[in-house]
Amino acid sequence: MDIEKVNSMDFGEFVDVFGNVVERCPLIAAAVWSQRPFSDLQDLKQHFHAFIDALPQAGQEGILRCHPDLAGRELQLGKLTAESQREQSGAGLTSLGADERLRLAELNAQYRARFGFPFVLAARLSDRAAVPRELARRLHCPPAQELRTALGEVKKIARLRLADLLGIDPARL
């Protein structure tokens, strides 16, 4: 998809296509649509990132709370978004053994209790062995640093999802 096609989309089509670039946050796509025309695909990505950056801390934490736990309850119940399902599956999180699932559930609970939002990681850039290591490592980060790290992961996920939607190599965004 080229930038001309993106710029020609009406509001409903744009939100339908880009509404889950940021997990379960179609309002972000709605806000980004109003910034058209975009000069290029990089500009489109920058508008998504700028919206996230401009939010107050409570709004940023709200975006994080829209993300599911990795290998968590929503995965077990089949309630992930299609994008999250593909990402977690690609990282091997859909085929964990019982002990691995239990360990991740414990770490996810500790993380959520400490920071007030779920652990967010661009699963497509990780694997089943790295996820619990990274979760355990980030549990010890200061809250302000962890908020920045988690939002950085949201932006990585958004970049990868945009690349998928636009049919381009993520390195181009």
Image: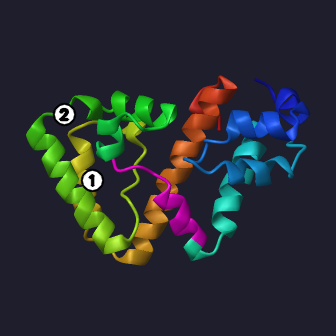
Q: What residue type is labelled 2?
A: Leu
Q: What residue type is labelled 1?
A: Glu
Q: Where is residue 4 in the image (x, y as percent from the top left)?
A: 88, 29
Q: Quadrant of the C terminus?
A: top right
Q: Does the magenta stretch include residue 110?
A: no
- x 71%, y 33%: residue: 17
Q: Does the magenta stretch include residue 60?
A: yes
Q: Height in image: 161 above or below 114?
A: above
Q: Where is residue 97 in the image (x, y as percent from the top left)?
A: 13, 34
Q: In the figure, is residue 47 to the left or right of 135?
A: right
**Residues drawn in magenta:** 59-70
Q: In the figure, is residue 116 to the left or right of 71?
A: right
Question: Do we see residue 40 in this rendering?
Answer: no
Residue hosting label 1: 134
Q: Where is residue 33 in the image (x, y as percent from the top left)?
A: 82, 47
Front tag of 1 and 2: 2
- x 90%, y 43%: residue: 37
Residue hosting label 2: 96
- x 38%, y 71%: residue: 116
SS category of the residue bearing label 1: helix
